Amino acid sequence: MKEALKIAIIGYGKMGHEIEKHALAAGHEIACIVDNEDDWNQFPGEAQVAIEFTTPDTAVNNIFRCFDASIPVVSGTTGWHNRLPEVSMICLAKNQTLLYASNFSLGVNIFFEINRRLTALLAPFKDYQPGISETHHTQKIDAPSGTAIVLANEIIDQDQRFNSWKLKEQKNLETEIPIESMRLDQVPGTHVVTWNGPADSIEIKHTAHNRSGFAQGALLAAQWVWQKKGIFTMKDLLNL
């Protein structure tokens, strides 16, 4: 195992509890837990790195607080990436550290790579139309999921027919990739990319069985990033 770390957990919901469980099992120490405004009084304590899973409305301020405390931060919150240019500029200006991802599951990040490869193979064949569906637990606030948006943007980057994604009821198949979002009880996360053609369909799918893969990936990210400076994603960690 790599060196044990003193970790600050920001956000103590289901993911925060899962990260705590896996961190302790791996020999790490929980330096502090931040779950409300008063808890910031103890931050960062002796923390060497922070792992942040909160809400889209609070994530950016949480990240900035880590920058101000000179604590590297691993953020798994989605729904705030429209502010990434601002966050990146401040991170670099303050010589701080951020590793962000829409999904920390190692399987999902391999799924991203398969999606990029499949898109490249199908891009010359214009009869195939892509679509994405994602299903999550009912407590997930943002829709579509950050993972679904990454999948759509990867298709847009490699297939010049498409310039945007839309929720399914708003789709324009000529230029937009439809995303269907569903919320069901007790579903950690399922993502499906389907390419429909006149003669057949091609489908790739990732299903999370539980939250442990997300927590283990976030801990792996924390170990990888804590002595680095700059802005990183799981692609950097996995060298994809």
Image (tube, grey):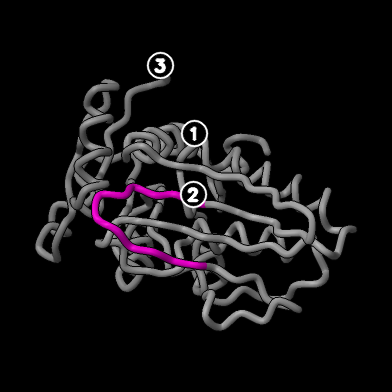
Question: Is 111 left, or right, of 40 in this rendering?
Answer: right
Task: Please identify the quadrant where the C terminus is shown.
Answer: top right
Residue pushed farthest top? 1
The quarter in which the N terminus is drawn is top left
- Tell me if residue 237 is in the magenta stretch: no
- Of residues 192 and 222, the one drawn nearer to the viewer in this rendering: 192
Find residue 235 and report its horizontal and vertical position in percent.
62, 43
**What mark, if any, has residue 126 been given in the picture?**
none
Residue in front for this viewpoint, 227 or 138: 138
Mark pair 1, 3: CA separation: 12 Å
Name which residue type carries label 1. Trp
Q: Which residue is mark 1?
A: 224
Task: Tell me: residue 104, above or below residue 134.
Answer: above
Badge 1 element: helix
Dot 1 or dot 3: first in sequence order is: 3
The residue sitting at 61% across, 45% down in the picture is 204
- The magenta-colored residue range is 180-191
Identity, as a three-letter code, of the amino acid under mark 3: Met
Residue 5 location in percent, x, y?
A: 32, 30
Residue at label 3? 1
- Identity, as a three-letter code, of the amino acid under mark 2: Leu
Q: Are marks 2 and 1 in contact (CB under 8 Å)?
A: yes
Compare residues 95 and 35 and report the one nearer the observer. Answer: 35
Does dot 3 land on a helix, a strand or a loop?
loop
Question: What residue is pinned by disc 2?
Answer: 99
Residue 237 location (% of width, % of height):
57, 37
Residue 177 falls in which quadrant of the image?
bottom right
